[in-house]
Amino acid sequence: MNNVISLKRRRSRVKIDLKKPDDFTLEKVRRLIASGNDRTYNQICVTNAGIVYLRAGCDPPPAKRLAFQFEGYVAGNGYVGPTAAQDTEWVKRVYRALARNWPEVEVDDYIDYY
């Protein structure tokens, strides 16, 4: 059995609908972050329909279907995974950046300072 981590583009099973206030919560953002694997590249993406997901792998996301995307998280930097999800300040920063940029992107469709 091959233990190599696939770097193909894939989406986290945790998704957040920014149009639904009961779905867009700190706890749901925490679950999104926890669902990531820190051993590979990750990126938070938001579709034009307002669905937030965590993309893993190095292939670029389908930009024409994205409202915006966050700066990518390099493997091993601790921005995703269960340990990152325990950092309440980090979870709040991600939550606030999502809130500030939906439905209108604040500055650019590539969010790298938040």
Image: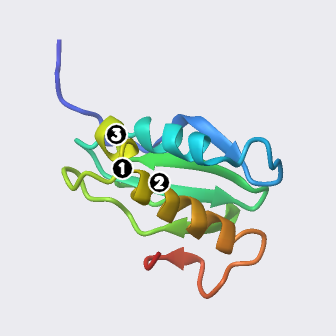
Give SS at disc 1: loop
Residue 98's label in the rendered image is none
**Disc 1 vs disc 2: Cβ atoms closer than 8 Å?**
yes
Give SS at disc 2: helix
Residue 91's label in the rendered image is 2
Q: For the view shown, which residue lies furthest in the bottom direction? A: 107
Q: Which residue is found at the position 25% from the left and 51% from the top?
A: 78
22 sits left or right of 70 in the view: right
Q: Of the two numbered discs 3 and 2 on the same chain, state the one appearing first in sequence.
A: 3
Label 2: few (<14), some or many (≥20) within 10 Å? many
Q: Which residue is found at the position 50% from the left and 43% from the top?
A: 30
Give SS at disc 3: loop
Is residue 60 at least partly visible in the picture? yes
Label 3: few (<14), some or many (≥20) within 10 Å? some
According to the picture, the residue beneath numbered tag 3 turns out to be 81
Q: Is residue 83 above or below residue 88?
A: above
According to the picture, the residue beneath numbered tag 1 turns out to be 87
Q: Which of label 3 and label 2 is nearer to you?
A: 2
| Amino acid type of the residue that numbered disc 3 sits on in the rendered structure | Gly
| Amino acid type of the residue that numbered disc 2 sits on in the rendered structure | Val
| Amino acid type of the residue that numbered disc 1 sits on in the rendered structure | Asp
Q: Is residue 113 above or below residue 95?
A: below
Which quarter of the rendered picture does the N terminus lie within? top left
Report the label total: 3
Residue nearer the viewer, 16 or 90? 90
Is residue 63 at least partly visible in the picture? no
**Label 1 to label 2, Cα distance in Å?**
6 Å
**Label 3 to label 2, Cα distance in Å?**
12 Å
Residue nearer the viewer, 36 or 2? 36
Q: Is residue 47 above or below residue 17?
A: below
**Label 1 to label 3, Cα distance in Å?**
11 Å
